[in-house]
Image (spheres, rainbow, N blue to C red):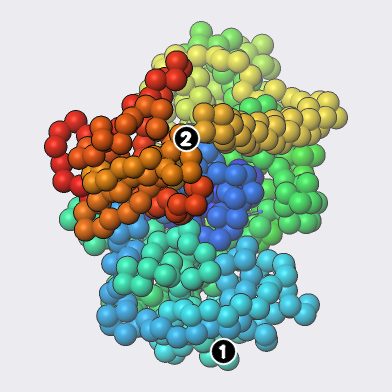
Amino acid sequence: MNKYYLTTPIYYPSDNLHIGHTYTTIAADTIKKYKKLKGFDVFFTTGTDEHGQKIQEKAKENGVTPKEYVDGIVEDIKKLWETLEIDYDFFRRSTDPDHEKTVQKIFTKLYEKDEIYKSFYEGYYCTPCESFWSKSQLVDGNKCPDCGRETHIEREETYFFRLSKYRDKLLKFYEENPDFIQPESRKNEMINNFLKDGLEDLSVSRSTFDWGIKVPFDEKHVIYVWIDALSCYLTALGYETEDDENFQKFWPADVHLVGKEIVRFHTIIWPALLMALDLPLPKKVFGHGWILFDDDKMSKSKGNVIYPEPIIELYGVDAFKYFLLREFSFGQDGSFSREKFLQRLNSDLANDLGNLVSRTITMIEKYNDSLIPKPVLEEGIDKELKDMASATHKKVDEYMQEFNFSYALEEIWKLIRRTNKYVDETMPWILAKDNKKDRLDTVLYNLAESLRIVAVLLNPFMSNTSKDILDQLGVTESLSWEDAGEWGKLESNLRVNKKDIMFPRLDIEKELVKLEKANSDLIRKRKELKEKKKLEENKEVKEAKEIEEKEELITIDDFAKVKLKVAKVIDCTNHPKADKLLVLTLKIGDETRTVVSGIKEYYKPEDLIGKKVIVVANLKPVKLRGIESNGMILAAEDENGNLTLLSTLDEIEDGATIS
Ligand code: MSP
């Protein structure tokens, strides 16, 4: 069986994911479903990229540890994938212990092969991108060329990966594998912007923060987050572990799907690292465009972030997936707007698809007792529909090879629209009225058969809708992709089964208000939840402090400051100048010292000589009525003023320490 390994990037759990992030994952999931239908053995990984300065700072802002911070968001991300019915095979968290261990192994291996060396780095650092830049790479003065934010100068001791030596090898690899970087324009960008003028060695460790995987032989350093993150594609398969069956089977990756801003990491740094590790390179890296909002990058600070959850809740998973894959050309940027989304829902889903399903099933119910009829009387007009239906499969296949989801869907919709037109042309209600049963049966069969083909072709994109259509047609057996390429496979006499309208027509104005409100409600809810968590956290810390203060709790470290010893009283006299004080001479191991104590009321000097007592041995000396006291002996006193000196339960040598 042919294998297929595909990946999404691992997402930063610095915040909840927006519709832009879901784009990559939905595309990957669609490819997986398509390949599976075509009989491939597919492995699909995704995950979260949890280390680095940005996350550490976010956690600090929220008053929690980095791990506590990401745990909550990772949970939300997993929930989102579940809602979107994403069928991934492995979720890699970069904080997984087995991942961390393998990344350390990779780093050590590279160091031992002299692919990594230690030196110093000074450069322009972009904290959000975790990247150093040279002055010539900066834009608008000192801004990061990737994200456009301000950089600052940083100098630090660092390990370097010998990236520079891979420039020619990379260019040769691109030449020998012309499809490695897709779309083509991204390849040119890589060559012209990064490779043409040579590559510099890459700083691959950081010592200015510590939320990361430690360099195993130099714990002052953490491994650069991108080496950590990129390695996830290997560690997800069990690379360098005892259980590396998946690695043996699935590596190299067939495709890494990534957004355009991280193509550089995946087509320059990643292949060079793999070459250094003597591993085969991925077959393809596809850099897709960004989903913008009103032509602007979505960002929290701009307040224009669109979250997927409200859209899915209001209109369903399939409508959301359909829109993203249909509206935008995968390789290019596109602008999301709620109006466009609602318009497509009305035109493509309600008018075209929903309408075709509903009228076909209704007519079969009405004119043929709910049974799929047998086609008996063909006419010329049928040929066009049949030819088109059979050809659609091939066209969709061709577009799917290029990950051109939008055109693939457009081909399916051409068939849907053609089939709707066929209804208008053949007018089954007239055929029924005129009692042209043979012709009517044929037309109804053709409609149902066209819908069956549409349903199979839609499966990778909109699995629920696809199943729903097949259910309504009474098709119960599972179909393969190839079944969509053959006209006439639909059996007659299946019983149709009408369901509710799949995509009701919407009042766009009303829905716009609803959608916008749902998005801001979610933002508010999440903010409140964060604040609440922060407050609770602060409250807990405050309460703990108060209890400590109230009960005068001390830590074990506080207690360890007090040096207590067993001492033997070798002499004891009354203080010559004070009524209440005794002067004791104590032997503490090899040392003798004088302690003045206010216990004359309770003990006579002769009672104490030869006794063992407990002394605080590291108390600052004080003079008590002219005599220097070097320590304090411990006594217990009850409410009635009874006092007794402390001693040990059993005999023990003086000088013994107490803890
Ligand atoms: N953690 C790194 C990836 C490491 S992979 C070894 C990262 N994470 S990210 O969360 O910032 O981005 C993850 C993916 O989401 C990227 O492919 C990025 O392009 C994509 N998108 C983020 N915003 C997007 C849009 N607005 N539109 C489309 N994709 C977007 O980079």
Residue 283 picture location, percent across and down? 39, 68
What is the quadrant of residue 216 in the picture? bottom left
Residue 344 occupies quadrant = top right
Q: Is residue 377 left or right of residue 615?
A: right
Residue kind at label 2, given as amino acid type: Asp
Quick one: SS at disc 1? Answer: loop
Residue 541 percent across, percent down from the top left:
57, 36
Q: Is residue 416 visible?
A: no
Residue at position x 49%, y 71% from top?
206
Picture quarter with ligand 1? bottom right
628 left or right of 103 in image: right
Residue 564 position in % (x across, y down): 32, 45
Question: Is residue 441 left or right of 33 when viewed as pictured?
Answer: right
Labelled disc at residue 196: 1
Question: Mark 2 or mark 1, which is nearer the start of the sequence?
Answer: 1
Which residue type carries mark 1? Answer: Lys
- Judged from this view, the residue extending furthest toward the left is 651
Residue at image point 79% right, 51% down: 302
| Residue at disc 2, secondary structure | loop
Ligand 1 within 8 angstroms of badge 1 C-beta? no
Residue 579's disc is: 2
Q: Quote the CA–CA distance across marks 1 and 2.
A: 95 Å
Tell me the number on the disc at residue 600.
Answer: none
Q: Is residue 588 visible?
A: yes
Q: Quadrant of the C terminus?
A: top left
Q: Which residue corresponds to the image point at 24% horizontal and 62% vertical from the top-left?
A: 240
- Front in this rendered view, residue 318 or 457: 318
Mark 2 Cα-neighbour bin, 10 Å: few <14, some 14–19, many ≥20: few
Q: How many numbered dots are placed on residues in this image?
A: 2
